[in-house]
Image (cartoon, rainbow, N blue to C red):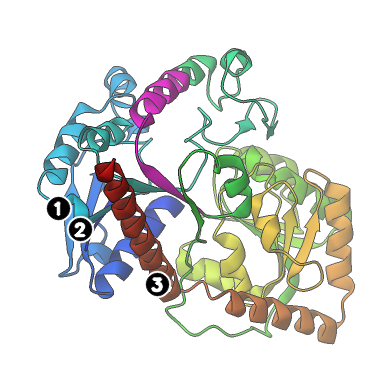
């Protein structure tokens, strides 16, 4: 079997690219023949494997190219369609799985048109909500709240984009073209959370739930050398709910870390920087792991759906309990009192009460909570090896279903 992995990026610059690249590597190590097709970026070293062939087009990301050119390329990227079509013409459709992870930042919806013209089925892993929402998040960035509008006139009239209304209109144009490309396509969907399944479940003929893997390259232990502090790890933007976290720390006076950078970093420093709140800036992977091991609890206050944030299971793999907003998909994995607590979105007072609860635990109680957090994470078994085994199982089901559908069609 040949697996074609499709990604906007050949390098790791975010969650979707990370999962795509790790999946390619894992499949190759499992003996599968992998072709990694990407629009942008220098290929990651993880793609250096005898079973992986990389096709990287070297195109610019939409946000960084010539604005006029990117306006058209973001909707209809003819080069990616042509090059992808050339690749598809070289493989046996009956022995090939096409698995798409991302397309909106470089490749554009024309890759779906290339598949449709060759009547090839494919699988999409949804890392966001672009399949059915023009801005990809079901989020009104101007009002900082979840959006429940469906495509239509009210959506068209709503200025929900994080940048401007003209950009929103451009996204609607792309969404219309995307729907046209996907119409009558034969594709299945992999979702990474139950919330995503509820939101996107009607977009494909078959839907599979497969959570993202996390890195277990080294043995994990529960640190007993932690301080009485909280941490936030992520992008500093309003939809991440970081202001709720800062307000809760201001109310309680507890020590807290903010690990990350983003568009509102300067504003947050001005409003909240003090003796009890430490802004660390961006940290590399190993430094973030050190943060996980050094705090009592992680806070994840996101006010939008999210996809399936890796921050939560990665922190829990070190025994760190999590306080998670009920607005996001990560709340599905929290069992109150077992691996953390769920609090109402945007409610700093409720978050502060949970913080007080965590801080009031004596050493034995917090160690018990950390152990149950670690044990539950280990039981979920989110290793790359397990992920690849389940993924190959999905591929096999898809091949069998496609064979049966084709046989039924031919017998008519």
Horizontally, residue 358 falls left or right of residue 182, namely right
State which quarter of the image contains the C terminus: top left
Q: Are marks 3 and 2 in contact (CB under 8 Å)?
A: no
**Label 3 SS:** helix
Within 10 angstroms of label 1, few (less than 14), some, or many (20 or more) residues? few
Residue at the front extreme of this rendering = 412
* Badge 3 vs badge 1, beta-carbon distance below 8 Å: no
Which image quadrant is residue 28 in?
Answer: bottom left
Q: Nearer the viewer, residue 270 or 194?
A: 194
Q: Secondary structure at mark 1?
A: loop
Q: How many numbered markers are drawn?
A: 3
Question: What span is in magenta?
Answer: 170-191
Q: Which residue is mark 1?
A: 92
* Percent x, y of residue 201: 55, 44
Q: Which residue is mark 2?
A: 95
Residue 389: numbered disc: 3
Viewer-proximal residue among 305 and 11: 305
Residue 343 belongs to the span the image colors magenta = no
Q: CA distance from mark 2 to mark 1?
A: 5 Å
CB of mark 2 within 8 Å of CB of mark 1? yes
Instruction: Measuring from the top left, give residue 183's x and y in whole percent.
Output: 38, 29
Q: Is residue 303 visible?
A: yes
């Amino acid at each position: 079997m040949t697996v074609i992995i499709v990604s906007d990026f050949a390098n790791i610059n975010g969650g979707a690219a990370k999962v795509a690249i790790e999946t390619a590597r894992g499949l190759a190590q499992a003996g599968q023949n992998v072709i990694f097709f990407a629009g942008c970026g220098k290929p990651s070293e993880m793609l250096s494997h005898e079973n992986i062939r990389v096709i990287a087009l070297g195109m610019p990301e939409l946000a960084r190219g010539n604005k006029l050119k990117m306006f058209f390329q973001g909707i209809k990227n003819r080069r990616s369609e042509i090059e992808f079509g050339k690749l598809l013409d070289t493989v046996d459709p009956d022995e090939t799985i096409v698995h798409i992870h991302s397309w909106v930042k470089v490749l554009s919806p024309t890759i779906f048109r290339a598949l449709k013209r060759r009547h090839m089925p494919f699988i999409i892993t949804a890392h966001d909500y672009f399949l059915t929402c023009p801005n990809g998040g079901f989020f009104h960035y101007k009002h900082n709240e979840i959006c429940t509008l469906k495509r239509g006139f009210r959506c068209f009239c709503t200025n929900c984009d994080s940048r401007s209304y003209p950009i929103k209109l451009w996204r609607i144009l792309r969404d219309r073209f995307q729907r046209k490309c996907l119409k009558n396509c034969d594709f299945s969907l992999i979702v990474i959370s139950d919330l995503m399944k509820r939101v996107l479940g009607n977009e494909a003929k078959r839907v599979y739930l497969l959570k993202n893997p996390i890195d277990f390259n080294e043995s994990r232990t529960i640190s007993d050398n932690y301080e009485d502090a909280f941490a936030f790890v992520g992008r500093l933007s309003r939809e991440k709910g970081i202001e709720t976290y800062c307000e809760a720390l201001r109310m309680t006076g507890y020590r807290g870390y903010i690990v990350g950078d983003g568009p509102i970093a300067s504003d947050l420093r001005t409003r909240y920087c003090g003796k009890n709140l430490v802004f660390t800036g961006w940290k590399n992977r190993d430094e973030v792991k050190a943060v996980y091991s050094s705090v009592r609890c992680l806070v994840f206050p996101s006010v939008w759906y999210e996809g399936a944030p890796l921050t939560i299971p990665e922190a829990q793999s070190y025994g760190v309990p999590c306080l998670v907003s009920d607005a996001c998909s990560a709340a599905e994995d929290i069992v109150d009192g077992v691996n953390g607590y769920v609090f109402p979105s945007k409610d700093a007072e409720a978050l502060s009460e949970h913080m007080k609860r965590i801080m009031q635990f004596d050493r034995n109680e917090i160690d018990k909570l950390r152990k149950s957090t670690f044990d539950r994470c280990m039981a979920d078994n989110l290793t790359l090896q397990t992920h690849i085994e389940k993924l190959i199982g999905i591929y096999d089901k898809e091949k069998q279903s496609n064979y049966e559908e084709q046989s039924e069609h031919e017998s008519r």
